[in-house]
Image: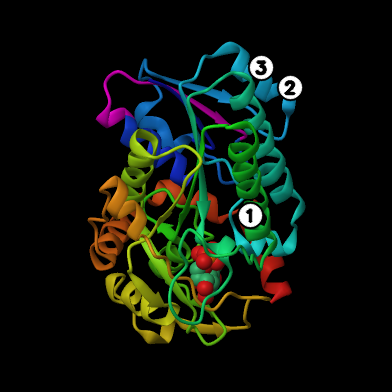
């Protein structure tokens, strides 16, 4: 099996590459990544010398680069992890999201179609469905994206649907709940809060902190994408969820406990503009049809994650300086 993983130097992509190399001996894997702020080859130090693995630097929004990639390698499958993903960044500056999440997906679909690639998995988010007060999103729920990030992901996902419908392109879309785990860039709430607490800093809880998110540990998500890659039906959509739903304040309390800090470290700050109140995923289809189920509880996954950040300061400390601080200051001004 020859697989292209786009965005493989990011948090989710790098975990997936490590997962696949560990589980499949007969794999050839190309990682195509632009190396933006969130792409970091440090995430893959332990596999970079593996003869089954090749890194190619490039931008999905660059049509010629994508064409050259597909010209140089014959792929059996493509997994598209490449995306701008952070809501707060999309509020500050939406443009990069359109280039990677919409145009990039378009270039990939064109290449998959032209080169007759056997299948493509589009890794997407539950945020395309918008916010739900009660109940859950299923695969038939309408797209109601509320941030420039989720609107861009929805645009890419709509193109996948259209390519499957119009050209028979063998693309499968997944909508997952929020991920967490080792190697996540410390701008997302869990690694931001853990690293702040380890540094003895406060954690900024947006608004009343009663927004609900559903959480999946990265290893469970890797297994879900692997199941979709192996057994998913082209043209289908699969939601990925765990039912591990918590209001942000409850999540924060768990992190305070694991980091040995008390509630005085909570700082209530102004709310995110257009902040989605609640995400909740109905993942019964992937459980039923592909036999996948999550294995890691939120409590266990958070404990593993805190332990990883405790023992990998050298990985995250540099990320919380320089460009990150510039972005962070801008974000505070906005709020
Ligand atoms: P985030 O990790 O940005 O993921 P998403 O917005 O894609 O769900 O945020 C998760 C939740 O945590 C969301 O409700 C916003 C909230 N949050 C804070 O309260 N403070 C923060 O500093 C951040 C980054 C997020």
Q: Is residue 12 magenta?
A: no
Residue 211 % position (x, y):
49, 79
Residue 104 horizontal side relative to residue 197, left or right? right
**Of 84 and 226, which appears nearest the observer?**
226
Q: Is residue 203 above or below residue 293?
A: below
Q: Residue at x 25, y 68 (%)?
A: 299
Q: Local crowd at mark 3 within 10 Å, few (<14), some, or many (≥20)? A: few
Report whether residue 55 is seen. yes
Q: Residue at x 33, y 32 (%)?
A: 20
Element at label 2: helix
* Rendered position, 299 above or below 208: above
- Residue 28 in the magenta stretch? The answer is yes
Disc 3 target residue? 68
Label 1, residues with CA under 10 Å away: few <14, some 14-19, many ≥20: many
Q: Mark 1 or mark 3: which comes first in sequence?
A: 3
Out of 335 and 108, give the one closest to the viewer. 108
Instruction: Assign a secondary structure to mark 3.
Output: helix
Q: In which quadrant will I find the C terminus?
A: bottom right
Query: How many numbered circles are shown?
Result: 3
Where residue 318 appears, x then y in whole percent? 52, 49
88 up-or-down from 174: above or below: below
C-alpha distance separating marks 1 and 2: 24 Å
Q: Are marks 3 and 2 in contact (CB under 8 Å)?
A: yes
Mark 2 surroundings within 10 Å by alpha-carbon count, few (fewer than 14), some (14 through 19), many (20 or more) = few
Boundaries of the magenta span = 21-34
Q: Is residue 74 left or right of residue 284?
A: right
User: Which residue bears the numbered disc 2?
Assistant: 64
Residue shown at the point (71%, 66%) measured from the top left = 330
- Dot 1 corresponds to which residue? 154
């Amino acid at each position: 099996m020859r697989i292209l993983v786009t965005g493989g130097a990011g948090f989710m992509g790098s975990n997936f590459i490590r997962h696949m190399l560990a589980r499949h001996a007969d794999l050839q894997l190309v990682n195509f990544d632009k190396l933006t702020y969130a792409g970091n080859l440090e995430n893959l130090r332990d596999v970079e010398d593996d003869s089954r693995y090749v890194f190619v630097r490039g931008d999905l929004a660059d049509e010629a680069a994508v064409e050259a990639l597909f010209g140089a390698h014959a792929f059996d499958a493509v997994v598209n992890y490449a995306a701008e993903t952070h809501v707060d960044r999309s509020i500050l500056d939406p443009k990069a999201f359109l280039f990677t999440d919409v145009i990039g997906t378009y270039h990939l679909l064109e290449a998959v179609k032209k080169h007759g690639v056997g299948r493509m998995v589009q890794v997407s988010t539950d945020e395309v469905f918008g916010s739900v007060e009660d109940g859950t999103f299923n695969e038939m729920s309408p797209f109601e994206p509320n941030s420039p990030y989720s609107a861009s992901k929805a645009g890419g996902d709509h193109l996948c649907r259209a390519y499957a419908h119009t050209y028979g392109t063998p693309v499968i879309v997944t909508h997952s709940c929020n991920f967490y785990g080792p190697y996540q860039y410390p701008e997302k709430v869990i690694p931001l809060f853990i690293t702040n607490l380890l540094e003895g800093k406060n954690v900024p809880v947006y608004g009343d902190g009663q927004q609900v998110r559903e959480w999946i540990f990265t290893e469970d998500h890797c297994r879900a994408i692997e199941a979709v890659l192996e057994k998913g039906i082209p043209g289908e959509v699969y939601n990925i969820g765990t039912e591990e739903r918590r209001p942000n304040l409850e999540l924060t309390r768990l992190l305070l406990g694991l980091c040995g800090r008390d509630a005085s470290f909570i700082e209530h700050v102004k709310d995110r503009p257009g902040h989605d109140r609640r995400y909740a995923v109905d993942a019964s289809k992937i459980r039923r049809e592909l036999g996948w189920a999550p294995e890691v509880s939120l409590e266990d996954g958070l404990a593993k994650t805190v332990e990883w950040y405790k023992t990998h300061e050298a990985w995250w400390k540099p990320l919380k300086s320089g460009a990150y601080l510039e972005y962070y200051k801008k974000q505070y001004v906005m709020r």
